[in-house]
Amino acid sequence: MGTRLQGRVAVITGALSGVGLATAKKFLDEGAKVVLGDVNAEAGAALAEELGATFVAVDVTDPDSVEALFRTAFETHGSIDIAFNNAEISPLEDGSILSTDLDTWRHVHEANLTSVYLCCQAALRYMLEHKHGSIINTASFVAVMGSATSQISYTASKGGVLSLSRELGVQFARDGIRVNALCPGPVSNPVAQELFDSDPGSAERQLVQIPMGRFAEPQEIANAVLFLASEESSFITASQFLVDGGISGAYVTPV
């Protein structure tokens, strides 16, 4: 057990799997009180009981549902110190701009960008009362460079998350609130595996772009979230925090 987040209250969306779950466990190990937000009420309640956390079922695209999540966190624990806005989707029908329909475009933007807007808005209302807080928004390495496998809606939504985070980081810096965009490279998780199963060449196209030659493990991304949430990153705000295995620094000829 560590103490890097001792007594801090953290809200995590997309908390039931992958990076969200790995981060929840890490935060709890470091002394935080954690409120898990996700859509699956049954699985969320079971996980919260197992971990010793609080769970709130949330639709991150609905303002009232998001407000209820953060209000519950505040009423239960008395403050909100950390918001890890991590919920996202990457549907298989999101591909080239030539084939992706408008409904998919809108759906992805609601889930990936509007959700971050709503969660930041809700978190800031509480953080401003105490003039302290860290908001970490999940963007992606594709927010700063083109993707080898086209996902036009996902890529555009993550660019929006990066820009939103940068602006909020600047706006609220003197209020003691830090806002950063976490930009992971490809992560080994069920969502990525589903994509690779549907397009066998996708994994190969991505791996050739990664200097480390592998995908990140969720725990490795969670380590970066912990750093951004803790006082160890107290002079970091409005940043694009890349955890991408060297992708953004490399020149690689695609296969």
Image: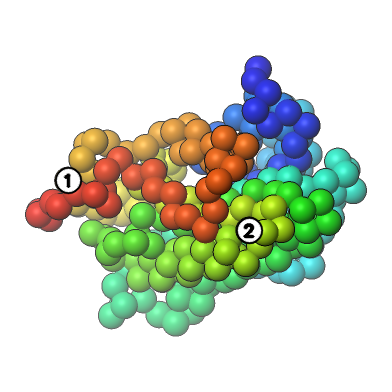
State whether residue 27 is above or below residue 237. Answer: above
Amino acid type indicated by mark 1: Val
State whether residue 116 is above or below residue 109. Answer: above
Could you tell me which residue is drawn at 62 percent across and 37 percent down? 231
Crowd tier of the residue under label 2, counting other residues whose Cα lies within 10 Å: few below 14, some 14–19, many 20 or above: some
Residue that lies at the very extreme toward the top in this rendered image = 1
Residue 69 seen anywhere in this rendered image of the structure = no
Please state, as top left, top right, bottom left or bottom right, where the C terminus lies in the image.
Answer: bottom left
Could you tell me which residue is drawn at 13 percent across and 51 percent down? 252
Q: Nearer the viewer, residue 7 or 11?
A: 7
Tags 2 and 1 in contact by the CB under 8 Å rule?
Answer: no
Q: Nearer the viewer, residue 183 or 198?
A: 183
Residue 27 seen anywhere in this rendered image of the structure = yes
Amino acid type indicated by mark 2: Ala
Front: mark 2 or 1 = 2
Q: Residue 78 bears which disc, if any?
A: none
Could you tell me which residue is drawn at 34 percent across and 45 percent down? 244
Could you tell me which residue is drawn at 36 percent across and 76 percent down? 100
**Which residue position holds label 2?**
173
**Which residue position holds label 1?**
208
Crowd tier of the residue under label 1, counting other residues whose Cα lies within 10 Å: few below 14, some 14–19, many 20 or above: some
In the displayed structure, does residue 150 sit left or right of residue 26? left
Q: Name the spot of residue 247 as percent of width and height, x first.
A: 26, 48
Q: Name the spot of residue 96 as percent of width and height, x first.
A: 29, 72
